[in-house]
Each structure stands twice: as C-alpha cells, then as structure tokens.
Amino acid sequence: MGDTTGKVSLGGKDHEYKVLSGTVGPDVVDIRKFYGDTGAFTYDPGFTSTASCASTITYIDGDEGVLLHRGYPIDQLAEQSSFMEVAYLLLNGELPSKGELDEFVHTITRHTMVHEQLATFYRGFRRDAHPMAIMCGVVGALSAFYHDSTDIDDPQQRTIASHRLIAKMPTIAAMAFKYALGQPFVFPKNELSYTGNFLRMTFSVPAEEYEVDPLIEAAMDKIFILHADHEQNASTSTVRLAGSSGANPFACIAAGIACLWGPAHGGANEAALNMLREIGTPDKIPEYIARAKNKDDPFRLMGFGHRVYKNYDPRAKVMQKTANEVLDKLGVTDPVFDVARELEQIALNDPYFVDKKLYPNVDFYSGIILSAIGFPTTMFTVLFALARTVGWVAQWNEMITDPDQKIGRPRQLYRGATKRDYVPVAKR
C-alpha cells in the first residue's frame, strides 16, 4: 500500500501524493497534506469522490452489482445465514463457531428489556407522532438510562453499549408501533429468536396467544440482513462524524436514525409503495410509464435504480423471491401488488429501463413485503433503522479504534461577502 504516487500541478508547482490501494476497489489518492502543501482545498459536494475512512467491513461494486460483508456475498448470507450471525460477522470480522454464535445470541436475548421508566418517556409523545420521531428521541435518551456504558475509551463499555443497542432496538421499535395504536407494550420473550421476538412484540396483544409464522419470520430476517450495512452511506457517515467528536454511542446512533429518516435515504421504500398506490391498478401503468419517460413531467418512478448500483442490486434479487413467497403465503389480494408485479416485468424488459439500468431495487420489494405483513408505511424506516443499527455499531467501533481517525472537519468553498464594517442601525 502506498507504493505508487500521483502528481498534482498547482500554481506552477508539482506536488506528489501517495496512491493507496485497498484489497479491492478503486485506488485512493492520499491528500491529507494537500492543504498544507498547496494552500488549496479540494471541492467534492456530497463527498462522492472522497474516501472518508479506511474500513474492512463492507465492500460495494456498484457497476458489477456486488455487495460483500467481510468478504461474504450478500446473497449467500441472506439465503444461508441468520441476522444474528451476520451481526456477529459485522462486529467481529469472522463468522462465529456454533459456541460463539450461541453465546452471542444469549447475550443479545438477555439485553432486550428496556428500563421501565422508558415507558413513561414514550407517553410524553403525541399519539400521532411519527415512529421515527419517537425513535430519535428514545435512542438518544438511552445514554441517560445506561450511563454505565458511555465511556468510549473502555473496550468493555463499548462492547456492552453495542450489545445493548442491537438488543433493545427491536423492543424500542415495537413500542413505537404499539404507542401509535394505543395498545399496551408487549415485553420480549427469551425463548424466541431475535426476529420472532420483534414480530411478537409488534403484532401480539395480551388478550390472546401469538404464533410466529416461520415464513414471515424468515422473510423479516432476510430483510434485516439485507439492510444491515451498506458501507459509507449518509447515515453511516453521520454516525462516524458524530462519533469522531467523542460523542457517546447512543447519541451517535440517534444521529444516524435522524439522517436515515430522510426520504432520499431510508424513506425510499415508503416512497416506492406510495407510488404503487398512486398508480392504483395495472391498467394505469402505461400512463405512468409514459409520464416517467417525459422529461418535462415531474413524476418519477420510485424503487428503480440506485445511487451506487448501476447493475441489478444484489439485495433486490433475494428480495424479489421473498416477496413472491410472502404474497403467496398470505394470499393477500391487493391491486397494489398486481401493479408491482406488472411494473417489475416492464422494468426488466422495456429498453428504456434496461438501457438506463433502472432495475427494481431493494426498496421496491421491501415495501411490498412489509405492507403485506401488516406494517404501515410509517414503520418502514423504523425497520430499516432497526437492521442498520448493527452496521452503524460495527462502523462506530471500527472508527473508535482507528489510529488515523480525527474529528470530522469538512472544508468549504466560501462565496459570501468579504470583510465589511458594521453600521449602527440608526445609520442604515
């Protein structure tokens, strides 16, 4: 690494910078001394051409449609692994032995309860509060309830905080759902799996027993796996940026949740489902396809294409199969799902979509599945946050132990007024 150099000519002078190579992916020009050498900044809105850190967790090749977690392809993990196993992999770097997995699951299972005073905290929100607003507040408040695990310099406390966040997120998410419905909170049950426990806390009521459907449980587990981590996206970068200041892990994850809430990020599956509902019935699809192709029409097809993937999103292939299994099992009759299936076929075959590589993405299918299971659209991003917490925690831990990590401090291209003197209000 760092065995080649690149030259930059600026102001009549040449400057050499190391070119760093990762194990896979594009080379990276090390410009840490660029400002000191040249007196100039680089300009990269959105940081889309800038590597903000070195990481060993997740690799994406958007052109080839590749997503690897610690080297393992996402489709293999989704089809053969479990969310708890993927969580262990992301946190620790290797797949666990049976004993290690059992111990990890045991630890997470016994951290799922939340402090009883948090129930009072929930009741401070309006009944019609968006679940993501509740999630932001409650997760941020965890540092006030669990201040015995906020010392980021203590590896033991970092581990405890990591386990607490992963374990309590399903409970917090289910409580947000129940609060909006006016139903009583349901306590976790240790005999159930991570995903099964979440489904029970979300959909059961004290008046009758709730049986977890294995197929729905498996579908939800896949959804969690497919959303567990996605490299340095907006919310993950937010978690890292917040963490770079030394903020406690609960505050950092709350910041990630706030970022994820944006419709351009975590709200994409909700937007995709809303679009399907707007189309309404299959016979209206040609009209909306024509509108999508019209550059002067503001209508956009949601759930197609991806900022990173210029090929078929590898997560979408898994989700497509899962969507069909869930719809067939539940026997849901809804014109929205008919629209989705027909629109999918058009997108996979219409030259307009194929040429522009506008393949159905993971958000297109996940919204359909979650709606069929019974989740309102307001819960979609909450479920995304639940799954992504694992990735956020893994990335936060990696950042804390990175010797090259500094407090985030982006620069700017200033185009405002230059120095001017203050004029008293009476003379203006």
Image (spheres, rainbow, N blue to C red):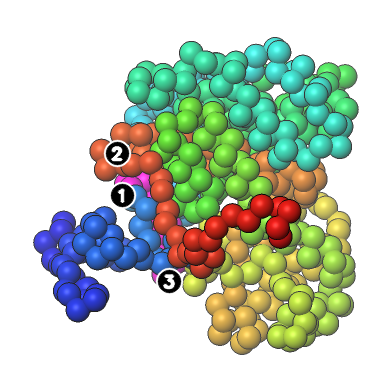
Q: Residues within 10 Å of mark 3 (few under 14, many from 20)?
A: few
Residue 334 picture location, percent across and down: 86, 58
**Does dot 2 land on a helix, a strand or a loop?**
loop
Q: Is residue 136 visible?
A: yes
23 or 100, which is in the foreground? 23
Looking at marks 1 and 2 on the same chain, the residue that comes earlier in the sequence is marked by 1
Residue 402 is left or right of residue 341, and the answer is: left
Residue 100 picture location, percent across and down: 37, 25
Q: Residue at x 51, y 45 (%)?
A: 238
Total numbered labels placed on residues in the image? 3
**Does dot 1 land on a helix, a strand or a loop?**
loop
Mark 1 belongs to which amino acid? Ala
Mark 3 belongs to which amino acid? Asp
Residue 77 is left or right of residue 214, and the answer is: left
265 or 322, which is in the foreground? 265
Looking at marks 1 and 3 on the same chain, the residue that comes earlier in the sequence is marked by 1
Magenta part of the chain: 54-70
Task: Kindly check if marks 1 and 2 are in contact, taking CB atoms under 8 A apart as contact.
Answer: yes
Q: Is residue 317 visible?
A: no
Q: Residue at x 28, y 63 (%)?
A: 39
Q: CA distance from mark 2 to mark 3?
A: 29 Å
Q: Residues within 10 Å of mark 2 (few under 14, many from 20)?
A: few
Based on the picture, tell me whether residue 69 belongs to the magenta stretch. yes
Q: CA distance from mark 1 to mark 3?
A: 21 Å
224 or 258, which is in the foreground? 258
Q: Residue at x 16, y 74 (%)?
A: 14
Q: Which residue is mark 3?
A: 63
State the mark number for residue 54: 1
Q: CA distance from mark 1 to mark 2?
A: 8 Å
Q: Which residue is mark 2?
A: 402
